[in-house]
Amino acid sequence: MTIFDVMGPVMVGPSSSHTAGAVRIGLTARRLLASEPVKADILLHGSFAATGAGHGTDRAIVAGLLGMAPDDPDIPRSLQLAKERGMAVHIHTGELRNAHPNTALVTVTNAMDRTVELSASSLGGGRIRINAIDGMEASFSGEYPTLIIRNQDRPGMLSEITRVLYEQRTNIATLQLYRDRKGGLAVTVIECDDPLTPALRQELAGLDGVVRYTYLNMTEGA
Amino acid sequence: MAFGSVGALLRAAEEKPLWEAVLDEDCRDRGADKKDSMERMTALWEAMVRSVDEYDPQQRSASGLSGGQAAKMAAAEKTLCGPYMGRVMATALSVAERNACMGRIVAAPTAGASGVMPAVLIPLRARENMDDEAMVRCLYVAAGFGQVIATRASVSGAEHGCQAEIGSASGMAAAALVHALGGTPGQMADACAMALQNVMGLVCDPVGGLVEEPCVKRNVMGAVNAMAAADMALAGIASAIPCDDVIDAMAAVGRAMPAALRETGEGGLAATRTGRKIAQRAGGKPGV
């Protein structure tokens, strides 16, 4: 908690959780897709579903998908802008099991038909938590450059991943491990202090036992 | 790791001005230099000024509940509170309405309470002929107290009710006003404590779950309460209960609050017959 969590951010109203946080959820989905979405399916759950329309939650998420920041004055016009840019948007409400009251499930598709599914919750003050990516459960803020790796659950896997990070002298801020069963598939979520180079990411992807990986960096690019 | 108590903040303010103690702590906290911190805070101040300057009396919120109220307040000729307080009230309304209408504001500490800080600071700058640097120092004072409130209690209505949103903004504003008028750090703590005491237990009961009714008007109360608390502190009136204890009491009250009174739109004004009707019309949460 810094003083700028209490003073600020500059944002488009009316609600830091239902508007500013919602923009960040949309923006996170866009970054994960790493390209312009042409199709978006947005499911609003809980308080997002109940009061989202009045808070502009729908427009806020779409604004994020278009690459806007929480203080962009165009947020209220985002549905119109999405139409102009050829993004097909479908917004609906539903129930997600065991989800935080302010949760959205966002599925985005790009022109190459690549799809990313993001489940994220808005915690207040514009802060968000990413709950799952493509069904892989996790729990992180997106405030740090983050690696989400799906790998085999076997001895030494983590040491190989961290060795690659150490080669670039990357400091690990936090680390989480999940697995479906012993010897099955695991999900490793690593928040780093610095952005990772493309070369390093390639090396990680090439490790024996890494099935798939996703890299999220909200601090750079569009 | 920031200030965990107003007591620690006051001790740090024995060696240097309180605003500077907050600035130095921020630099340590984030590994930033003073220039970076000052630039960020100055940008927030400038955004606050713009949020007032760009008020459009024609704007209306999507629900139709908010808009045009600041213009009415500013146009009122005979008021009990007088012209200066009238400007404060109109400023609070203008930012809170702008927020409801999806305009750009500065969350301080939240979007729902964004009208309080500009309402007490912007008319004051004009009256006292203060420069922007002085106003930025006020924001550091407010942020220092706000950080303690956020750490020991909460600034979220969903967690601790409106006392945590408008209440916190009011306490932060009261401390900033004492600084602006040359008071001591002890008086800042007293002002913050008294402002918080006055709204202890205030529930968060937005009609339809929307940040509009009564939120927009409670920004006015937050600003007026901050000015009264600051004036009391500057007159030498102390809070019998120390500021840290008041904040802890506020947290305890917040924890005891039922969910219906914590931003769910299910209790208080939201649960009245009219509140429910408005919610249905506005497309917000119908309430229960």
Image (cartoon, coloured by chain):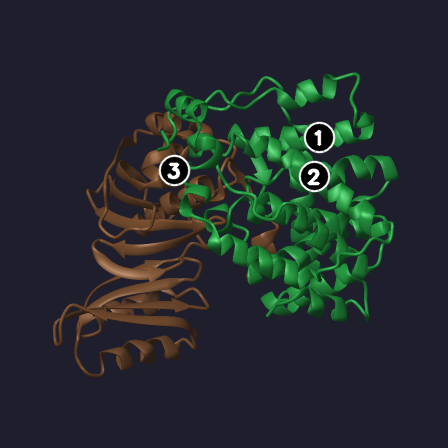
Chain colours: A brown, B green
Q: Quadrant of the N terminus of chain B?
A: bottom right
Q: CA distance from mark 3 to mark 1?
A: 37 Å
Q: Secondary structure at mark 1?
A: helix
Chain of the residue where label 1 is placed in the rendered structure = B
Residue B240 in the image: above or below residue A9: below
Residue A94 in the image: above or below residue A146: above
Image check: B142 left or right of A200? right
Per the rendering, the mark at residue B223 is: 2
User: Percent position (x, y) of residue B99?
Assistant: 55, 33
Q: CA distance from mark 1 to mark 2?
A: 7 Å
Return the disc, 1 or 2, that comes first in the chain's sequence: 1
Nearer the camera: disc 3 or disc 1: 1
The residue shown at (37%, 55%) is: A129
Asked if badges 1 and 2 are on one and the same chain, I answer yes
Q: Which residue type carries mark 3?
A: Leu
The residue shown at (26%, 55%) is: A133
User: Circle 3: is it few (<14), some (14-19), or many (20+) Cα within 10 Å?
Assistant: many
Q: Quadrant of the C terminus of chain B?
A: top left
Residues at marks 3 and 1 touching, judged by CB atoms closer than 8 Å: no
The residue shown at (37%, 28%) is: A79
Per the rendering, the mark at residue A66 is: 3
Residues at marks 1 and 2 touching, judged by CB atoms closer than 8 Å: yes
Considering depth in this image, is A27 or A130 the residue closer to the camera? Answer: A130
Q: Which residue type carries mark 2?
A: Ala
Image check: B221 left or right of B12? left
Asked if badges 3 and 2 are on one and the same chain, I answer no
Residue A52 in the image: above or below residue B256: above
User: Percent position (x, y) of residue B85?
Assistant: 78, 31
Per the rendering, the mark at residue A57 is: none
